[in-house]
Image: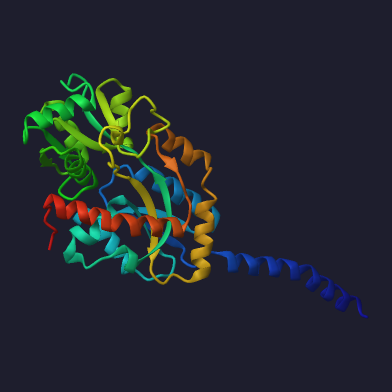
Amino acid sequence: MHRRQALGLAGAALAAPLLATGAARAQDAWPIRQVRVVIPFAAGGPQDIPARIIAERLSRTLGATFIVENRPGVGGGLGAQMVANSAPDGGTLLFISSSVAILPTLQKQLNFDPRRDLAPLTVVCDVPAGLMVRIDSRFDSLASLLAEAKANPGKLTYGSGGVGSANHLAGAQFAALAGIETVHVPYRGISQAVNAIYTGEIDYIFGSSVEVLAHYRQGRARLLGMTMPQRVPAVPEIPAIAEQVPGFTAPNWFAMFAPKGMPAPLMQRLVAELKAMHNDEVLVSRLGPAAAIVRMDGPEALAAQLAAEIPRWEGVIRSAGINPQG
């Protein structure tokens, strides 16, 4: 064999593994180079922090650039519907709160149902909510609030981030199960409702732990009860509302979806990456102070949660006489 031929064969043999590695990397690359992670609420909300942590992690592990994009409107419906109408090619994902279980009943004009129009990826985390009053409120316990509400029907007021918001429905369900009459005061966002507590415009609010725990820990507010079925481990001194109002629970959670029809290999890979974040130090450390509990338990758990909560919230909306939009 001529020396030149021998060198050529040796070079080809050395190049073969490199070519194979390059082919594997090309095969592993996420098919869309820039991926939108849509939050269907205004910037600065409680979803922003976990969504950005997850987007940064996926950018590293999937080799694409994941960018968080806020698309507010119609109680989260506009952004959710935009994702549902996007191509199922891995280029658009949805990061939304438990309000997704309210949309099918309350926003009829959208003709949108997450069970039909979106592919579940995972519940990201459970986010407890609490009933908050000002630190100098005359209510020093849930019992005192309930006693006054029963003695003075229609006197107590509670605020929310808007008609049909999760905190509005929590308040409506609380009143129904406690057998009290209260007045709902909607605001343009939960931060305005929190401010209204301090100005004395309203008596109490239901707010997620992301929104209310800091006020409690700073000694500016009291939390009279939490909305989870049992006491929250991060704040065990605060009773579950269900201890005095049997049957009350208002689950609050964040979840991720993809457009329906995403190819199975992409879905499986994305779900695997999300499940791997269950013990992610950054995610756990950033959500821990807000008493949020990271789940990352996959599509089946999210599908089951939707199946249970959509009809439950529909019942609350109907019984409270909250008018669907559209």
Task: Tell me what residue is drawn at x 36 percent, y 24 percent.
Answer: 237
Q: Would you identify the image quadrant in which residue 36 lies?
A: bottom left
Task: Tell me what residue is drawn at x 39 percent, y 33 percent.
Answer: 232
Q: Would you identify the image quadrant in which residue 141 lies?
A: top left
Q: Nearer the viewer, residue 17 or 247?
A: 247
Q: Nearer the viewer, residue 177 or 16?
A: 177
Q: Is residue 276 above or below residue 121?
A: above
Left or right of residue 282, residue 127 in this image: left
Task: Tell me what residue is drawn at x 43 percent, y 40 percent.
Answer: 293
| Placement of the C terminus among the 4 image quadrants | bottom left
| Placement of the N terminus among the 4 image quadrants | bottom right
Q: Nearer the viewer, residue 21 or 53?
A: 53
Residue 123: x percent and y percent? 41, 52
Residue 140 seen by the camera = yes
The residue furthest right is 1
Residue 316: x percent and y percent? 20, 51
Residue 279: x percent and y percent? 53, 43
Left or right of residue 182, residue 70 in this image: right
Q: Is residue 8 above or below residue 72?
A: below
Residue 5: x percent and y percent? 86, 79
